[in-house]
Image: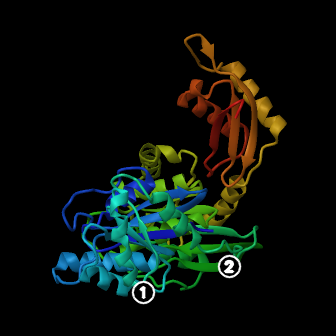
Amino acid sequence: MANPVVAIVGRPNVGKSTLFNRIVGERLAIVEDVPGVTRDRLYSKAEWLGKSFYLIDTGGIAFDDHDALIDSIRHQAELAIDEADVIIFVVDGTVGITEEDQSVARMLFRSKKPIVLAVNKIDNTKRLHDIYEFYSLGVGEPYPVSGAHATGIGDLLDEVIKHFPEHEEDAYDEDVIRVSLIGRPNVGKSSLVNALLGEERVIVSDIAGTTRDAIDTPFMFEGQEYVLIDTAGMRKRGKVYESTEKYSVMRALRAMERSDVVLVVLNGEEGIIEQDKKVAGYAHEAGRGVIIVVNKWDAVEKDERTMNRFVAEIRQEFKYLSYAPILFVSAKTKQRVHTILPKVAQVAEQHAFRIATPVLNDLIQEATTVTPPPSDKGRRLRINYATQVSVKPPTLVLFVNDKELMHFSYQRYLENKIREAFPLEGTPIRILVRNKSE
């Protein structure tokens, strides 16, 4: 199941970004004591008491100004509220209730989403009495917090996770292969869906951003059940474009979490741009099987070396996806589209591949004999035992004498040896290093 989404909302200058940074543990949001600094929603993954969730930081919601920027920020916040499973409503405990707070409260009440009220800037116990007036907002119990001093955050998050949706059983059987298509707008994802299905199941348009939401399309191919998940295009932050496309990034992330295999779609006519690498990075970080699909290949002027040059460029620009197969297709002419689903089935199989523990340990022993592990100040790394702990993606644990001695280059060497021995095309491999005593 996809992780729940928590949106932080409130009027300008109540400390939403500071609270966001405290919860995610990093300074990801710009923090400045000026209204309107957070102009776009910012996403990050967070965790509390073993429960993972996406956190959305939003710009301040203002109602008394019809400036185009203020309207845009408010619209973004409304979209974040629509996407959220739980809303953290932030108010300023040093100021008290304002008309804007009341307007935000009414908007949130209409959303019918669970609301957790955070009274921010309660920096010491002497200010605790300042929270009681906020009961009159009618959105529930106020929780005193200080984003600046990191107090009260635990109690706030305890309440937030109480409202997370119960994990329901997946709607699809385990043997159904779930495939999502991601890529920046106008690379032809919807056209690919139609080409794969052989019918016009998804609206296709030359206008970037036609697909607004993730769309599940179950179908059967050569006896195998699939579900295609088409997602709205992702486009570079900061560029002027329809706000609904920004909103779609979260939908794409959640779609990937539900997938076994992700098709990273590139526009062969335009080539690789920076945003392509960012989009592909989402799939790699999600640990999904990955296939790089170069679409619109029919529109590319080619000679006998064009494809090889493009492959070399992909391998250079997407070094972290060295395991991903590359397909060149044209949704428009159906050229090589027939190669996609067989490759998806193959990658899905490798994504769920399991290595027997004795075989894995024999392989590790042989690899360490050929190339001994590194040493530091006379201490050499020793791998005592290896085992696979999960699939999708294949995840291995190496128990060692001192994990600080494991250099990333040696870990990469071991991964390469594993890939040489087993058919793991298209899937990342996660290697966790633990001390023997852990």
**Above or below, comparing residue 379 to residue 239 in the picture:** above
Is residue 252 placed above or below 280 in the rendered structure? Answer: below
Judge left or right: residue 30 versus residue 319. Answer: left
Name the residue located 71 percent from the left edge and 46 percent from the top edge.
423
Mark 2 burial class by Cα count in 10 Å: few <14, some 14-19, many 20+: some
Give the labeled residue for mark 2: 219
Q: Position of residue 93 (x, y in %)?
A: 31, 68
Q: Where is residue 219, by image quadrant? A: bottom right
Q: Which residue is mark 1?
A: 109
At a point 75% along the width and 25% down the height, the residue shown is: 365
Secondary structure under the numbered disc 1 in the rendered image: helix
Give the amino acid at mark 1.
Phe
Q: Is residue 259 left or right of residue 237?
A: right
Q: Residue furthest top?
A: 378
Circle 1 crowding by C-alpha within 10 Å: few under 14, some 14–19, many from 20? some
Residue 241: percent from left, percent from top? 28, 73
Residue depicted at 20% across the width and 67% down the height: 35
- Dot 2 falls on a residue whose secondary structure is strand
